Image (spheres, grey):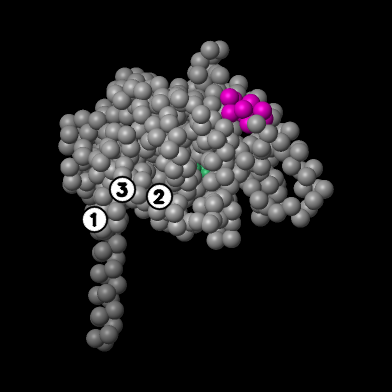
Amino acid sequence: MDHFLLSIAITLAIIIKFLFKYSLAKPKEKLPLAPGTFGWPIIGETIEFLVSLRYGLVHEFVQKRTKKYKSNVFKTSLLGQNVAIFSGQEANKFIFNNGNKLVIGWRPSSIQKLFPSTSFVPIEHDTKRAQNVMSYFLNSQNVDSLISTMDIMSHLHLENYWKGKNEVIVYDLVKLFTFSLSTRVFMGIENSDKILNLYEKFNIFSRGLLVMDIKFPGTTFYKAMRAGKELRKEMKAIFEERRVELQENPDLPKVDVLTKVITEQDENGKYLTEVEMADKLFGFIVGGYDTTATTITLVMKYLKEKPEFFNGIMEEQNEIARNMMPRIVLCWDDIQKMRKTWSFVNEVLRDTPVVQGLFREAIEDITYNDFLVPKGWKIYLSFGVTQKNGEYFPNPTQFDPSRFEGNGQLVPYTSAPFGVGHKICPGREFARILILVFLHNVLKNFQWEAKDPSEKILWPYFLVPIPTAGYPVTLSTV
Ligand code: HEM
């Protein structure tokens, strides 16, 4: 009997709890949207945002509003989209850790139009594929061969374009070098006329990535779309050439991205279409050549502006050069020893981030700091605000590479030039090696002086930071 009464009491308790939860309880109140303004109709706050992007001042655009709204997430409207802008270490952690759960990558419509396959290939598939391809180059069997190609090509480039010149424009030359290296390593192209032809077109193409997608003759976006069309035609011929090579020699190893995209099949045995193949290759080239060229240029500029670090870096590079004798090309172990140089590069990227922030899309309603970010909204994560925050980087305006010298003082999720988490830049290790190999060759062979020590840095086309005149320098051989 006791048992019977007890089971009735438990059943009643469960029913009451259920009723209370689902019918008697007050309906859950919807959280408010983050504070902020959508700005002007249609254009929202796009113009102010793009101006700050161009001048490398997105952190100021964000800081002004986080102070005003007393919140490190606020709403706005950019590029015709409702956007929640996040900043700060906690926000970096939240967004990077929730990749694929609450947020996915998002590409503005200019990018979607320039890469047509992105409208039907989920962005996360591309990330995975790109990471797989890069891990092929960087595995322990292939990495030394990649480093030796980079070293030999750096040497040849400097012999052909720098040696014997009194003056060079650093950015223009380094960009041509990183492009030539990318086409060689990713597609096996070595013919210099072919490279120059592709280079011209890729430069026009990539300028259209982040501009307003107004397809009217004369606009940057129109020219980019036209260059994309011409590039796809060229790619068709390149694919055909490689297919013939592969048919004649089926054992040709999968040495580059081109062979990989041609031979790759999905789980149903389906090959990529030509549009998809071209987009994959364009992604690697566009993602890689300008970002690395601009980083090398900025590092050379900072080395002259912060001479107190120059000798330490020269010592490190000279020691590596001495110890590698009689070997003449760099290898993986040499790259690992370039710690001081890499810390310097990291501090340059903290001070002048090559990528100022990232876009994502909310795939569910998100609650953050008691605010709602509705499903479908876009998210912009600003890196600059965190990288210039004195709480994480004491004396943030002071240039100090020792912050990155591995004493465990760096707070996780505060410095993220390549992103963090499942969408982290697939080319980050490739970029590290390339930047270090090229700098090693420049430092070993040349001295330079800026022609205009007060040359400013801008983000023309909103993409990467570039000294306004491309950093012209006078040159002498060591
Ligand atoms: C200093 C040089 C570089 C910087 C600062 C940089 C930075 C970044 C960042 C911040 C992202 C976005 C990550 C995210 O969404 O969370 C990214 C994506 C990407 N990067 Fe890099 N990157 C550099 C060099 C390279 C190189 C050399 C390559 C190619 C070899 C490359 C290929 C890519 C690709 C393909 C993506 C898009 C991946 C996707 O679809 O999710 N990057 N990069």
Image x and y of residue 413, in percent: 31, 50
At mark 2, the secondary structure is helix
- Amino acid tagged 1: Gln
- Amino acid tagged 2: Asn
Q: Residue at x 25, y 64 (%)?
A: 16
Q: Residue furthest top?
A: 217
At mark 3, the secondary structure is helix
Q: Residue at x 25, y 80 (%)?
A: 6
Q: In front here: 155 or 13?
A: 155
Q: Quadrant of residue 9?
A: bottom left
Q: Is residue 234 visible?
A: yes
Region of the chain picked out in magenta, as a range: 193-201
Residue assigned mark 1: 409
Q: In front here: 444 or 244?
A: 444
Q: Are there few (<14), some (14-19), or many (20+) residues within 10 Å of tag 1? A: few
Q: CA distance from mark 2 to mark 3?
A: 10 Å
Left or right, 117 with respect to 340, comes to: right
Residue 312 disc label:
3
Ranked by sequence position, the earlier of labels 1 and 3 is 3
Q: Is residue 435 visible?
A: no
Residue assigned mark 2: 318
